[in-house]
Image: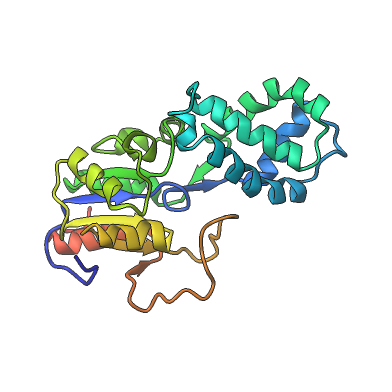
């Protein structure tokens, strides 16, 4: 299925989460730093830039040792235990004293996870809620595909996104495949009782995971690129070739496309 301009009515719209529907209130490394200091680490032990530099190596190391959030490790980890390891290794690599960190991680870990499970850590884009409400009012199914564990459900609920979806999100934790794998897209379509093809749209901000992956799975892709909304750590390349890519700049573009293709009049 190409992502060319289709005239088939839209049946289902799938969304990525981060930098598509919502974005961090502050860069993630700054939020790690804030909670680490609040949790009792010596203020001059770490700085935001050292946390930023430490996060990706720590994430990679933990993910390699305990893949899929530790779901099948022996013994199995909970998502909370897995993320605690990420937090611990990040702060240790950033310069925290091991003895002090061992003493404080029991406070810092839960505080950080609670922060990112709420609207303290994330904020919706201005048009997010209106877009989901409009699609529901127009009778179009909606759901989410995310490379995430079940903790994301708390985040989506706190941001008032979860109640507006027609179907529950499809998560890599459950499917055990991550975007851009076709399996996660096909699983989402099954959950939403919709066959892949024209009329099923995936909206996301990452070219490979969200756009290329969905198109390869037979779904129409829409790459959202907002002016100035470049979240720290987002997977983007400045010299990307987007000449053949369907790019939108707002979730409002999705609503307008649905109205046009489904022959609906604007809401009065």
Q: Position of residue 26 (x, y in %)?
A: 63, 46
Which residue is pictured at 51% across the width and 64% down the height?
236
User: Where 229 sits versus 106, above or below?
Assistant: below
Tally of numbered tags: 0
In the rendered image, the quadrant that contains the N terminus is: bottom left
Viewer can see residue 252: no
User: Where 62 sits versus 199, above or below?
Assistant: above
Outermost residue toward the front in this view: 74
Q: In screen coordinates, is 88 left or right of 200?
A: right
Q: In screen coordinates, is 177 left or right of 230?
A: left
Q: Quadrant of residue 214?
A: bottom left
Q: How is the image coloured?
A: rainbow
Q: In screen coordinates, is 2 left or right of 128?
A: left
Q: 18 or 61, which lies in front?
A: 61
Q: Quadrant of residue 29?
A: top right
Viewer can see residue 136: yes
Q: Position of residue 185 (x, y in %)?
A: 27, 49
Which residue is pictured at 61% across the width and 24% down the height?
110
Outermost residue toward the bottom in this view: 243
Q: Position of residue 19 (x, y in %)?
A: 47, 52
Which residue is pictured at 15% across the width and 60% down the height?
198
Q: Position of residue 40 (x, y in %)?
A: 80, 26
Outermost residue toward the right in this view: 44
Which residue is pictured at 44% across the width and 64% down the height?
225
Q: In screen coordinates, is 167 left or right of 79?
A: left
User: Where 120 sits versus 178, above or below?
Assistant: above
Q: 255 or 8, which lies in front?
A: 8
């Amino acid at each position: 299925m190409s992502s060319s301009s289709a005239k088939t009515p839209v049946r289902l719209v799938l969304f990525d989460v981060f930098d598509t529907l919502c974005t961090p209130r502050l860069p993630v490394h700054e939020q790690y730093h804030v909670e680490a200091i609040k949790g009792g680490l010596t203020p001059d032990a770490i700085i935001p830039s050292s946390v930023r530099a430490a996060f990706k190596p720590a994430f990679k190391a933990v993910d390699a040792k305990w893949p899929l959030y530790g779901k099948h490790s022996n013994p199995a980890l909970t998502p909370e235990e897995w993320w605690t390891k990420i937090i611990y290794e990040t702060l240790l690599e950033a310069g925290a004293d091991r003895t002090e960190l061992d003493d404080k991680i029991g406070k810092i870990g839960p505080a950080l996870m609670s922060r990112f499970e709420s609207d303290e850590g994330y904020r919706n884009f201005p048009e997010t809620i209106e877009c989901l409400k409009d699609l529901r009012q127009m009778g179009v199914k909606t759901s989410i595909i995310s490379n995430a564990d079940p903790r994301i459900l708390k985040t989506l609920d706190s941001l008032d996104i979860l109640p507006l979806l027609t179907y529950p999100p499809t998560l890599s934790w459950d499917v055990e495949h991550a975007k851009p794998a076709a399996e996660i897209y096909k699983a989402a379509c099954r959950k939403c009782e919709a066959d892949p093809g024209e009329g099923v749209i995936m909206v996301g901000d990452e070219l490979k995971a969200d756009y290329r992956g969905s198109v390869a799975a037979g779904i129409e892709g829409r790459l959202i690129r907002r002016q100035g909304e470049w979240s720290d750590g987002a997977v983007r390349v400045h010299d990307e070739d987007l000449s053949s890519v369907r790019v939108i700049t707002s979730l409002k573009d999705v609503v307008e496309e649905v109205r046009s293709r489904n022959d609906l009049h604007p809401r009065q």
